[in-house]
Image (cartoon, rainbow, N blue to C red):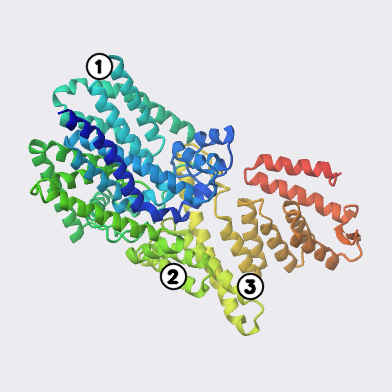
Amino acid sequence: MTEQTTSRRWLNPVLVGVLGLLVLLAYSNSFRCGMVIDNQVLIGNDPRLRNVAVENVRLIFSQEYWWPTAGVGVYRPLATLSYWFNYAILGNGENPAGYHVVNFLLQWLNAVLAYFFSSRLLREKLPAFFAAALFALHPVGTEVVTNIVGRTDQLAATLILAALLCYIRSTEATGWRRAGWLALMSLSATAGMFSKENAVVVVAVILLYDVVFRPRQLRECWRPLLALLPVYIVFWIARKLVFAHSLPSQFPFTDNPLIGADFWMTRLTAIKVLSRYLWLLIWPAKLSCDYSYNEIPVVAWDWQTGAALAVLAGIVTLAVWAWRRNKPLFFFIAFAAGTMLPTSNLIVLIGNIMGERYAYVPLIGFAGCVVVAAQMLPKRVWPVVLVAGVVACGVRTFARNVDWRDSLSIWRSAVEVCPGSFKTQKSYAKAFYDAGLDVDYVIGIAERARAIIEAKPLTLAQQSYGVYADLGYYHVDKAERLTGSPLMAGVTAQSYRRAVEFLDHAAAIEDAVSRELAVKLARQNRSPSEISHMGDFHIYGNLGLANLRLGNFEKSIAAYAHMQKLEPGNAKGYLGASLAQAGLGRNEEANVLILEALLLGNNDEGIWREAFNFYAARYPGENAVVINAGRPQLNVQSPLVRRHLCEAYRQLARAYRDAGMEVQAGQIEEMARKEQVCL
C-alpha cells in the first residue's frame, strides 16, 4: 500500500513534465514566427511598452487596450502589462522570440491546470492527462498561442481554471482556510476579467460545478456569489472610468455582418457559426485567421442552418441524457457551451462574426467530452484512440505554426481557406506589396477584395474604406514609379485617375461612418466635434498627391488641408499643399507652407532644399537666402522671410489647435515668441 501511494505521488509531476514536453514539441517551431496581424499595432506601436516607468504602468491601467489608436471598447490592462513585461522588463523589444517563450509557458500552465481540474471531475489521472493534452495540443489553439497577442485568451483560461480550482478547494476546507481559498478565487477572477472580458463567465462556471457535483449544498452557493460580487463591481467601475470620455464603440459591418441583420437572422446565422466551430474542433484540417465579410453569408435559412439546428438539438439531447447518467460529460458539455456564449453573437454582438480564438476556452470542455466518449470504448482500445488523437493534434499544430511565420504566409493560408472574405484578400494584397512584389499583381488581388464588397448592395457606412484606400495607394505608387517615362504617360495618368476615384470613395465611406458616430454622440448629449479629428490621414495625403500630379490643384489643396487637420505634425501635408499652391501661382501661400514643413522637420535636408529653391526662384532680389560657411541658409533678417515665418507659426499653431492638440499648439506659439519673428 505504501509503495502504491508513493508511486501515485510521483505520477502528478511526471504527467506535468510530459505535458510540458508535448507542448514544447508541438510549438517548438512557433518561436521563429514573427509579429503578424495585430501584433505590430498592439506591441510595436504601443508607446506604453517602451520603458520601465511608473507613468507607463499608469497609462496601461487608465487607457484602453488599443490605445493610442481609435478604440473599440476593449479594456485588458493585465494583457498589456504582460506585453510591457516582455518589452521593457525582459528587454525583448520587438524581437518576437521572448514573447513566444512566455506564451509557451502559459500554454503549459493551462495544460497543467486543465489536468488537475479534469482529475477532479474524472477521478482518474490517465483520462485527465489525455483531456489536458488534447486541449493543449489542439491546432485551433494556434491562433492563441502562436499569435502573440492571443495571450489574452491564454490568460483568461488560466484564471478561469485557477478560480474554479480555488473554489473546489474552498468546498473542502473550513474556517479561515475556506476564506483563504475564496479570496484566491476572487483574485483569480479579477485578474481574468482584466485580461479579457470573456472571463466574466467564471461565476457561471462555478455555479455550474455546484449544480452538477454539489446539488445538496446549493444552499451554500451564496459564498462564491458574495465573494465574486466585489469583483464584478470593480470591473464595471474600472470600465466606466476608462471609457467615460471615449467615443462609442464602432464595430465595422464588414468584420461582423450580423450587425446589419434582423434579430432572427442574426441568431440563426450565429447557430450556423457555432456548428462551424464544432466542425473545426472535430476536424481542424482547414484553419484561417479571418472569417470576415462575406465568407459566412448572413441568410435566414439554408441547408447549413438546418444542419446546425439538428446538431444543436443533438447536443441538447446528449446533455439531457448525460445529466442522469454521466455527470462529467454533462459538465464538460455545459462548460463548453457556457464559455462559448459570450462570443457567440447569440446574446450580444461582438466585433467579429467568427474567430478561432473564441473556441480556446471552450476547447477545455470539448477535450473533456472527447475523453469521456472515448472511455465508453473497450478498456484496451480507448487509450490507443486518445494517443492517436493527441499525436494527430500535435502534428497538425506543428504544421499550422508554419502559417504564422510572417504576414505573407498567414494571409496566403487564409485566402486558401476563406477566399470569400474581403479581409483575407485585402490583407494578402498588402502582404504581397510589403514584400516588394509586382504592384500590378497586388492590385489584382486587392480588386478581388473590392469585388466581394461590391457583390451585394451595401450602404457607404457598411463598406470598408481600407479596401479603397489601399487600391488608391497602389495606383499612386504605380504611377509614381512610371513618372518620367514618356512611353508610359497614358498609363501613368490613368493610374492617377483610378487612384483619385478609389480615394474619393474611401473618404466618402469615412464621412458616412463619422456621420453615424455623430448621431450616437448626439443621443448621449455629446458634441459631434469630438470626432472632427478622426480619420486616416493617408487617404488625404495620397489623394492630394494624385490630384497634384493630374493638375487638379484646388482639389489637391483641399485634400492636403484635410490631412493637416488629421495629422498636423506630418510635414508631407504642407509640402504637397505648397506645390499645389505654387501650381496656381500663389507664391506667398506656397512659401508659408514650405516654412511650416520646415518648422516640423528642420533636420530634413529635402525640406531645406525645397525652401531654398522656392525663395531663389520666386524672390531673387529679396536676399532671402544667404551663404554661411559655404552652406545656404534662410536669412531671418529679411523682412520677407520674417513675414512668412510669422504666418507659418500662426498657421501651424492653428492646425494643431484644430486637431484638438492644445499643448502642441502652445509649444509652437512659444517657439515663435523665442524666435521673435512676430514682433
Instruction: Single out the mark in the foreground, 3 or 1.
Output: 1
Number of the label disc, if any, that sits on residue 193: none
Q: Within 10 angstroms of label 1, few (less than 14), some, or many (20 or more) residues?
A: few
One can see residue 561 in this view: yes
Earlier along the polypeptide chain: callout 3 or callout 1? 1
| Vertical placement of residue 99 versus 430, above or below | above
One can see residue 355 in this view: no
Three-letter amino acid code of the residue under disc 2: Ile
* Residue located beneath label 3 in the image: 550
**Point 18% across, 31% down: residue:** 3
Query: In the image as oriented, which residue stretches furthest toward the top?
Result: 175
Mark 2 → mark 1, Cα distance in angstroms: 65 Å
Number of the label disc, if any, that sits on residue 174: 1
Residue 210, picture quadrant: top left
Instruction: Single out the mark in the foreground, 2 or 3.
Output: 2
Dot 2 falls on a residue whose secondary structure is helix
Q: Which of 259 and 459 is in front in this view?
A: 259
Residue 662 falls left or right of residue 453: right
Number of the label disc, if any, that sits on residue 445: 2
| Vertical placement of residue 374 versus 500, above or below | above
Instruction: Single out the mark in the foreground, 2 or 1.
Output: 1
- Quadrant that contains the N terminus: top left
Three-letter amino acid code of the residue under disc 3: Leu
Three-letter amino acid code of the residue under disc 1: Thr
Q: Within 10 angstroms of label 2, few (less than 14), some, or many (20 or more) residues?
A: many
Dot 1 falls on a residue whose secondary structure is loop
